[in-house]
Amino acid sequence: MQVPFNEAKATQTAALLLRLRGAPMSYMKLIKLMYLVDREALLRWGRPISTDSYVSMNKGPVLSKTYDLITDGIAPGTDSVWAQFISAPANREVSLLKETPTEELSRAEQELIQEVFAHHGRKSRWEIVDWMHDNLPEWTNPEGTSIPITYGDILRAGKKSEVEIAAIEDELKHLAFVSFAIR
């Protein structure tokens, strides 16, 4: 059972990355940075920030639901936190529409976002793609399709033991169940 996607946290993560950039950003680069943030959160704390689902695509790992928000747009009549704060792509770039609150993000999460941006934010989108291909063992070349990346795949790539992986996956399943029950 997948933990439900947290659009508010994904939006606030994207907004903070865009704010750190200080200018519009290629949505491919934004999605790659967001993946790196979620990946590092999962490896450090046993839970990602956005709780998006991930897939391997030709240009590296992608946050699936975030990618859909950007490329497919928002269905008419649907309330979307994303659409309130992040622009639709123009020339393959997105930007902040207005100042975004950060109350969904903990201080540690905000610091992690800043850390990932400090490490990768000045790279071009193509440098990040190449870096991901060379350094993220969970990415598999899908050769024109997409292949799911599980939390377990990321944790194994991050050298977590099978015992640690099982404990983290159990906690995430419990979190997914609680989130589902609250709805």
Image (cartoon, rainbow, N blue to C red):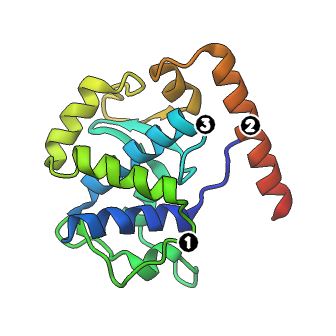
Residue 8: percent from the left, percent from the top? 55, 68
| Dot label at residue 46 | 3
Q: What residue type is labelled 3?
A: Gly
Vertical order, 54 against 13 (above or below)? above
Query: How far apart, in angstroms, are the residues tagged by discs 2 and 1?
Result: 23 Å
Secondary structure of the residue carrying tag 1 is loop
- Name the residue that disc number 1 marks: 103
Mark 3 packing: few (<14 Cα in 10 Å), some, or many (20+)? Answer: some
Q: Quadrant of residue 127?
A: top left
Choose between 20 and 135: the one closer to the eye.
Answer: 20
Q: Would you place residue 168 above or below residue 26 in this image? A: above
Identify which amino acid the numbered label 1 is placed on. Answer: Glu
The foreground one among 88 and 143 is 88
Mark drawn on residue 171: 2
Q: Residue at x 31, y 28 (%)?
A: 143
Q: Distance between the residues labelled 3 and 1?
A: 21 Å
Q: How crowded is mark 1: few (under 14 residues within 10 Å), some or many (20 or more)?
A: few
SS assignment at label 3: loop
Mark 2 Cα within 10 Å, few/some/many (few <14, many 20+)?
some
